[in-house]
Amino acid sequence: MPFELTILGSSSALPTSERYPTAQVLNILGRFFLIDCGEGTQIQLRRLKIGFSKIKHIFISHLHGDHYYGLIGLISTLNLLGLKTEVHIYSPSELKDLIQPQLNFIKGEMNVNLIFHPLNFKKKQKIYSDKRVEVFSFPLNHSISTCGFLFKEIKKQANIKKEAIQQFTIPIAQIKKIKAGADFITENGETILNKTLTTPPPHPRSYAFCTDTAYHEPIVEVIKNVDLLYHEATFPEEMRDFAAKTMHSTAIDAAKIAKLANAKKLIIGHFSARYNNSSLFENEARTFFENCEAVQEGKTYKIISKT
Amino acid sequence: MPFELTILGSSSALPTSERYPTAQVLNILGRFFLIDCGEGTQIQLRRLKIGFSKIKHIFISHLHGDHYYGLIGLISTLNLLGLKTEVHIYSPSELKDLIQPQLNFIKGEMNVNLIFHPLNFKKKQKIYSDKRVEVFSFPLNHSISTCGFLFKEIKKQANIKKEAIQQFTIPIAQIKKIKAGADFITENGETILNKTLTTPPPHPRSYAFCTDTAYHEPIVEVIKNVDLLYHEATFPEEMRDFAAKTMHSTAIDAAKIAKLANAKKLIIGHFSARYNNSSLFENEARTFFENCEAVQEGKTYKIISKT
């Protein structure tokens, strides 16, 4: 069952010949979440053979152009393809007004039904959930209102061992309670501990997306123990002052957040166009957090399910 | 002295993994004219190492998204680069309102001064001129108001032969008139024909851009004898009915226009995403007009100056 992130774009505000502006696709159990939508997103989707029709949920972190200028083109294409579908957009509330004139200008029937969900920039908020997945937004610290996103599998119940059902003659009525964590009391009054009766559920996997932001410790609590963390690293250490001025992070800032949050793996991106080699960023981050990688466009990062 | 066209994008409404939406850069004697600005234009400019600061004039044929969705990103980048410059945009008048909310949202000082010039969809009009170059817009026939563009070098005056000045003792006061085409009358009353006194000026080069449009013969008169003609060829012949319905041209339509206009060379593009091989279009067009080529992105088409 997939939990995998594909990088479509990873440059910062100015484009480079190597990197597109920010966009990612996260596939959790067949749900395709598009995270940010910089210019060229639809072209990258096409190149990476990710079907447009799979995109039902789009998360826009903030309204700097390199994070949303690809949205109108993607919507226009969904519409031209005649997809009569709902597309949910989780974004700053102003987004709708920014693209509304262009939406109005699209002649003919608008097939796609856009549903806008304004983000909350004051506190963590659950913005999406179904039986298997939930998504939270949480405030970052940038020059304009910006949210990070946390995507989590919902923890499944424990599995009850078949041999335990037979051995202790557990009635069907009890199974639900045991799966939920209860012990079992036999006819003889003996208590069988839950851990004897069950195998633990798979580890619920998680991904956190944190861009754009200055170093911001309050997010640590939100993303604690995350499996995969994408954190912006716009500048190397030699530009720390400029990073602070523009409210961006250095590679070491990203690594410190990953370490404090006890992330399993850190991936970094949003590199300044001044630099054409990401190894500088990667090397600096690794001095604080070894399991770090500078993202590559087109690459898919998989989180394997484990118990 | 360059007169050269570089193709940035040449797909039609739906993106492909091979082709960007429409955008071209025409360099006439060091003036860089951007023609249409589909999504990804700034990325292609970067890849092809065409400096953003050279772009001072942008021509938008019509307001289907694949011809202008890259404009806001390009403007944003020009602004981030701190270029305090004028950028002239020749486009349907509605364009300003379509992108105004996004322009308003760009915080801080807007360095770039955008000057909008509305196009005339009723008749041919001169929309730009300087000492060496002039540009005309002219109506095409598409589902929404659309203009083609004709870029022309201004014909220079003839060169007067140095040996003729000496031979006939031509006074300086007469030279200007002779360059403009006058004959010369010697002191003896003998008339020396202008063609004896001068060498003709270089052939003034020209380029016409015609997309999107159905087959539309009225443009032939406007683009007569053009050196290089770009004409859309969205569909091959097997989709002639659909071409008519969507007000696009087939490859043969493009070739017929090139032939009627006595164009020197025809290049075609804007191919439907249904087809991943442009040779079908090229072969069909060549049955009517031999000197035809399906455009390649990144390729530069040069028009050599000749007398």
Image (cartoon, coloured by chain):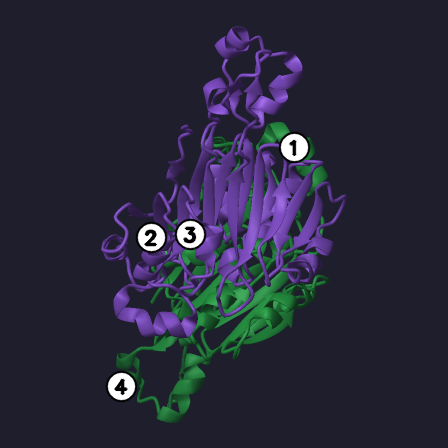
Chain colours: A purple, B green
Contact, CB < 8 Å: mark 1 with mark 4? Answer: no
Callout 1, which amino acid?
Arg
Q: Is residue A258 above or below residue B138?
A: above
Q: Nearer the viewer, mark 2 or mark 1?
A: 2
Q: Nearer the viewer, mark 3 or mark 4?
A: 3
> Of marks 1 and 4, which one's residue comes earlier in the chain?
4
> Of marks 3 and 2, which one's residue comes earlier in the chain?
3
Gap between marks 3 and 2 measured at Cα: 28 Å
Badge 4: few (under 14), some or many (20 or more) residues near its Cα, within 10 Å?
few
Contact, CB < 8 Å: mark 3 with mark 4? Answer: no
Residue A9 picture location, percent across and down: 43, 49
Q: Nearer the viewer, mark 3 or mark 2?
A: 2
Contact, CB < 8 Å: mark 3 with mark 2? Answer: no
Callout 3, which amino acid?
Tyr
Q: Which residue is denoted by mark 4 in the rendering?
A: B166
- Mark carried by residue A20: 3
Callout 4, which amino acid?
Gln
Q: Is residue A82 above or below residue B145?
A: above
* Chain hosting mark 4: B
Contact, CB < 8 Å: mark 3 with mark 1? Answer: no
Is residue A35 among the parts visible in the rendering? yes
Specify whether disc 2 shares its chain with disc 1: no
Badge 3: few (under 14), some or many (20 or more) residues near its Cα, within 10 Å?
many
Gap between marks 3 and 4 measured at Cα: 64 Å
- Mark carried by residue A110: none
Badge 1: few (under 14), some or many (20 or more) residues near its Cα, within 10 Å?
some
Residue A191 picture location, percent across and down: 53, 20
Contact, CB < 8 Å: mark 2 with mark 1? Answer: no
Q: Is residue B293 left or right of residue A30?
A: left
Q: Which residue is denoted by mark 1 in the rendering?
A: B240
Gap between marks 2 and 4 measured at Cα: 87 Å
Dot 1 falls on a residue whose secondary structure is: helix
